[in-house]
Image: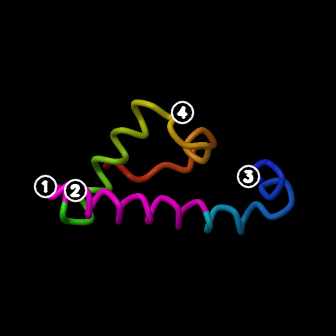
Amino acid sequence: WINYYTHFYKTEMYAVLRYINNALVKWVRRKYKKRKHRRRAEYWLGCIAKRDRNLFAHWKMGILPTAE
């Protein structure tokens, strides 16, 4: 579905994929107590995304959590 909707609704898909990244950050914050703060969780998830982009389909497209 990602391939289909990115072809026709590219700008809308970016918002949806960013929402998925935010949901992943929320999950990390609940799962790992050391990463309780949003910035730490997002940075950690961004490092994982840079290391292994094949974990999620939208990471392959380049929609990654920020790891500054």
In the drawing, what numbered circle is on residue 2? 3
Tell whether label 3 touches label 1 (CB within 8 Å).
Answer: no
Badge 1 amino acid: Lys
Q: Which residue is mark 2?
A: 40
Q: CA distance from mark 3 to mark 4?
A: 15 Å
- First along the sequence among labels 3 and 4: 3
Determine whether, in the image, residue 56 is placed left or right of residue 4: left
The kind of secondary structure element at disc 2 is helix
Mark 2 neighbour density, 10 Å: few (under 14) some (14–19) many (20 or more): some
Which numbered marker is on residue 34? 1
Q: CA distance from mark 4 to mark 1?
A: 25 Å
When asked about the image quadrant of residue 24, the answer is bottom left
Labels 2 and 1 touching (C-beta < 8 A): yes
Question: Which residue position holds label 4?
Answer: 54
Counting residues from the start of the chain, the first of labels 3 and 2 encountered is 3
**Residue 33 versus residue 62: which sits nearer the camera?**
33
Residue 11 in which image quadrant: bottom right
Q: Picture coordinates of residue 51 (x, y %)?
A: 39, 30
Residue type, label 2: Arg
